[in-house]
Image (cartoon, rainbow, N blue to C red):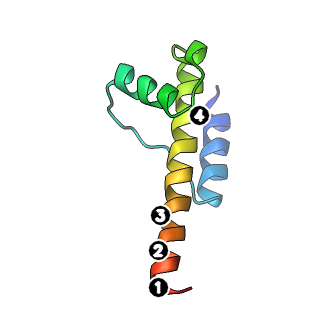
Amino acid sequence: MTCIERKNRYLDRKSKGLAVLDVEVDLTELTDALIEAQYLPEWDAHDRSKVEAALSRVVADLIKVTRSKLRKLIGV
């Protein structure tokens, strides 16, 4: 990927309010949890891009649930 492509991807993420975070995890534990929670098929456990996509879905779902619970608490 060229530096122009990286910059364009960064600007696209920034315009959408998105960011890439570096998070240190135990990859075996993470993939096991993603498989158990049915976010990741077992055969994709060694594909880093599939693991990242599954983790992104987990975080997105967590945010939705948390916002929903918060709205119910404050009556919005």
Q: Quadrant of residue 25?
A: top left
Q: Residue 29, how many percent across, how many down?
A: 35, 24
Q: Position of residue 21 (x, y in %)?
A: 43, 43
Q: Quadrant of residue 27?
A: top left
Neighbours of disc 3 within 10 Å: few (<14), some (14-19), many (20+): few
- Which of disc 4 and disc 1 is earlier in sequence? 4
Residue appearing at x 61%, y 37% in the figure? 6
Residue plotted at (57% across, 27% down)? 40
Q: Which residue is mark 2?
A: 70
Q: Which mark is residue 74?
A: 1
Q: In terms of secondary structure, where does tag 1 sit?
A: helix
Q: Nearer the viewer, residue 69 or 2?
A: 69
- Taking depth in this image into account, of 63 and 21 the one nearest to the observer is 63
Query: Disc 1 to disc 3, how far (Cα)?
Result: 12 Å
- Kindly indicate whether the residue at mark 3 contacts the one at mark 1 (C-beta within 8 angstroms): no
Given the image, on which type of amino acid does mark 4 rest? Answer: Ala
Image-quadrant location for residue 73? bottom left
Q: Amino acid at mark 3?
A: Thr
Secondary-structure class at tag 3: helix
Residue at horizontal 53%, vertical 27%? 51
Vertical order, 52 against 41 (above or below): below
